[in-house]
Image (tube, coloured by chain):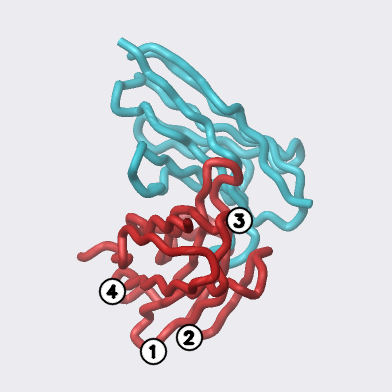
Amino acid sequence: GQSLEQPSEVTAVEGAIVQINCTYQTSGFYGLSWYQQHDGGAPTFLSYNGLDGLEETGRFSSFLSRSDSYGYLLLQELQMKDSASYFCAGILAGTALIFGKGTTLSVSS
Amino acid sequence: KAGVTQTPRYLIKTRGQQVTLSCSPISGHRSVSWYQQTPGQGLQFLFEYFSETQRNKGNFPGRFSGRQFSNSRSEMNVSTLELGDSALYLCASTHRTSGTGPGANVLTFGAGSRLTVL
């Protein structure tokens, strides 16, 4: 089957760095994407890794290693507004994504 | 540029009824996909439409169906509703990101239609 595993919860303080890991068991993923979802809101796109390596977008970075079936999202200089759920998603084809169950990040002051 | 519009935002149905949800993608986007979100199962892919054709389908029973019109607007229908169909139904329209590869798509989600089945 196809599945993505990520921690259910992560806590951190403002200004800290947090890494959310995602491991997957599947074949045929074209890449890995990350989405953020605030309570009551819709998921919003954060990043995409189509190739192995690191992609950086401002305070957020994402990494993919196909050989290890592993990726992570790195959030730096955490802010209270970063408190949200974060989903990794494997891309099967087109816009058919398989999502992990999500990681709830709680940032405290 | 207007975002993805989903209607209705909230609805309550009873078991056995059917429901139709509507989605208008971002202007110019031809790909629309649908997802079901529940606390227990998370986000699950339902189906994807491109230029009025279903391109991919998730692992849902035949009670779940959809279609796309020539103006790219999409509808999904759930017949013979069950209690377990209570969920947030999200529609997304797609554009390419600057990344490499066939998976370099960005999904922009609508606010969703929250269905409660009693």
Report how far apart the C-alphas of labels 4 and 1 lie in the structure. Answer: 13 Å
Q: CA distance from mark 1 to mark 3?
A: 26 Å
N-terminal-most mark, 2 or 4: 4
The amino acid type found where label 4 is placed reads Ser
Q: Distance from label 1 to label 2 (Cα)?
A: 6 Å
- Which chain's residue wears label 2? B
Q: Secondary structure at mark 4?
A: loop
Give the secondary structure at mark 2.
loop
Q: Are marks 4 and 1 on the same chain?
A: yes
**Front residue (pair A61, A107):** A107
User: Is A56 situated above or below A108?
Assistant: below
- Quickly name the residue at label 1: B70
Horizontal and vertical percent position of residue B11? 35, 61
Using the image, tell me which numbered label, if any, was put on residue A91: 3
Q: Which residue is mark 4?
A: B27
- Tell me, by letter, which chain the rendering colours cyan: A
Question: What residue is at 36 percent from the left and 79 percent from the top?
Answer: B73
